Amino acid sequence: MSVNFIEVRSLRKTYGTTVAVDDVSLTLEEGRTAAIIGSSGCGKSTFLRCLNLLETPTEGSMRIGGDTVTFANDKMASGEDQALRFRKSMAMVFQSFDLFPHMTALRNVSLAPTIVNGLKREEAEGLALKLLERVDLRHKADAYPGQLSGGQAQRVAIARALAMNPRVLLFDEATSALDPELVGEVLAVIKDLAKEGRTLLVVTHELAFARDVADTLYFFDQGRVLESGKPQELMSNPQTERLRAFLKRFQGPLNS
């Protein structure tokens, strides 16, 4: 019997009278990939930021492995130690790369392991070189972000996330800021991570990628999970008019 590694229950996030995430519940087994799709402004990125505790949910609970955090009235009901373990179990890759412009690719990847995990600089840089090689960028170790293409910068950001040895990797529209010809090189890295059996949650507009790589698909609409299931089944036989309309806009790419 499979046991869910990630379990989110009745998660809600409001900003005043605006409801960004509305009673969202989802689960994911360890080593699986979930893709989250939906129109811009539907709450999917806010949900990911709540999961990573970059935003404090208004109410609900989230569990990763044996660590659970709960929320009520825009405050965390769990202890700080529990929250720290929860936060350290994840790493997030953002659409805007967020690399330090004054640091080389090597230093961007090796910085957090020295500060957060206490590695010696030499050890952290050895790890960083291996991870840059993992994303086919060892030859760019001494390059600064301004000297990299968008696709290269995003692959450095993925290496930086991997340097923290997270139990879960979160991707928030990791390809949306890239020129179309650079999207493939980043998606290829994410596909490889999924094949390795890593636990991934991927917010994406790349529907063909979601169909072919994800084990579970969640369709967000107006802050809620409107439909969920196996990607190919959901995309070939949507149950709501809202998902049918959303998929229709991507009919070409999905048939390719």
Image (cartoon, grey):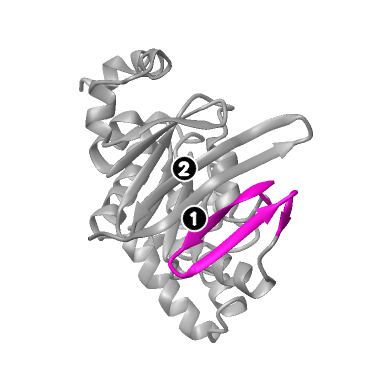
Q: Element at badge 1? A: helix
The residue wearing badge 2 is: 174
Most foreground residue, 131 or 101: 131
Per the image, is 85 magenta?
no
Task: Please identify the quadrant where the C terminus is shown.
Answer: top left
Proximity of marks 1 and 2: CB atoms separated by less than 8 Å: yes
* Circle nearer the N terminus (1, 2): 1
Q: Quadrant of residue 179?
A: top left
Q: Quadrant of residue 107?
A: bottom right
Q: Residue at x 26, y 42 (%)?
A: 213
Q: Element at badge 2? A: loop
Which residues lie in the magenta part?
56-76
Image position of 229 (left or right of 160): left
Q: Is residue 101 visible?
A: no
Looking at the picture, how far across and down is residue 136, in whole percent? Answer: 33, 58
- At label 1, the amino acid type is Ala
Looking at the picture, how far across and down is residue 126, in whole percent? Answer: 42, 79
Q: Residue at x 55, y 44 (%)?
A: 10
Q: Is residue 123 visible?
A: yes
- Name the front one of labels 1 and 2: 2
The residue wearing badge 1 is: 157
Looking at the picture, how far across and down is residue 128, in whole percent? Answer: 44, 71
Task: Please identify the quadrant where the N terminus is shown.
Answer: bottom left
Which residue extends farthest right? 16
Image position of 225 (left or right of 209): right
Looking at the picture, how far across and down is residue 155, in whole percent? Answer: 42, 52
Q: Disc 1 and disc 2: Cα gap in Å?
A: 10 Å
- At label 2, the amino acid type is Ala
